[in-house]
Image (tube, helix red, strand yellow):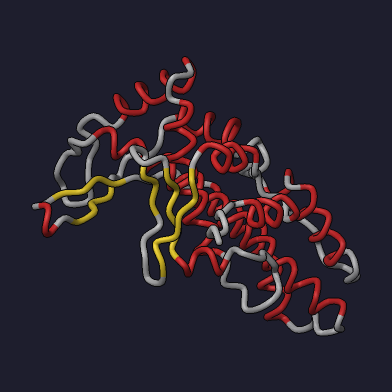
Amino acid sequence: MAAKKLSLQSFIKGARLHGLPTKFLQRVDGKYELKSSGPGGEDLFRPFLGQLVLSAETAERTSSLSFEPPMNEAGGIQAIYHEATHAFLAMMKQQPDVAALIREGERHYKKAPLTDKSKGGDTERLFQEAISEYVAHRAVAFWQAGEQLFLAEKAHKAGKASGRAFWDNFRRIPRNYEQAMGQRVFGYQNKGWPWARSQVETTKAISGKMKDFADRVILEGAIPDQFARVKRYADSYKGICRSVPGFICEF
C-alpha cells in the first residue's frame, strides 16, 4: 500500500479560517514535495531536491489550528511560514520583480554589521533569512494577538472579565501587536568551521523594498502594522471594551 502523500492542505485551511494569508502556501504546496524529518527533526527547505521538510513536532502542532488550549501552534506556524518563504522565493526567482528583489536584497546586506562586531559576507544567506524571518515573525505575532483576544472574549462571556489585572492585560493586546509589527531587524549567516558552525545575527534592518514585497505579495496585505486595520481583531476588541461603562476603547 502506497504511503499517504503529505500535504499542507489541513494547515492552509486552518490558517485561512483564522485570517492568516495562505495563497503563497498554496502555491508552495503545489510545487514542492512535503517530507517529514521525524521526531526531533529539522524544519528546512531543500531546493535541489524540491522538498519542504517539517519535523514531526511541527506537523503535529499545526495539524489542527485552534485558539483553544494547549495553544502550542505558534512554533509550528513560525516554521512553516519561514521555510515556505524560502520555497516561494526559489519558485519565483525567475520572475523579473522577484529577481530584482533578490539582487537588491543581497546588495542591501553587503558588509552588513553582525552581532559579533564583524561584517557579513554571505549576502545570499543574510537576505534569505531576513525576509523569511520577517514573514514568519509577523504570522506568529498575528496569531498570538488572536489567541489573546480569544481568551479575553472567553473570560468576558464567562463573567470573569473583572479586576485591574484583566483590563491591564486587555489594553496591552493592541500595544503588543503593534510593537511586534514594528520589528525590522532580522537575518543571520553561518560562521565557523563546518563541524562547529554557528548562526550570527545581523543588526541591520530589512530594506523598504523587502518589507513591501513581503507585506504585499507574500502576506497579501493581510497583516498590517496597525492593530486597528485588522478588522476582525478591532471589532472583537471594541465589542469587549464597550461593554464596560467608562472604559476607553482606544488603540
Based on the displayed image, in which of its 4 quarters is residue 223 positioned? top right
Rendered residue at 75%/72% (across/down): 152
Q: Report x, y in % for residue 78.
A: 50, 56
In the rendered image, the vertical position of residue 203 relative to residue 60, given as above or below: above
Q: Nearer the viewer, residue 2 or 196?
A: 2
Please tell me which residue is depicted at 70% across the width and 67% down the height of the picture.
66
Closest to the observer: 25 or 186?
25
Give the quarter of the image for residue 142. bottom right
Q: Is residue 61 above or below residue 97?
A: below
Q: Horizontal and vertical percent for residue 6?
A: 55, 55
In the rendered image, residue 204, in percent from the top left (x then y), is placed at 32, 40
185 vs 64, left or right, is left
Query: Residue placed at 54% from the left, 30% from the top?
Result: 212
Q: Nearer the viewer, residue 130 or 235?
A: 130
Q: Is residue 96 above or below residue 149?
A: above
Quarter of the image where the N terminus is located: bottom right
Report the number of discs. 0
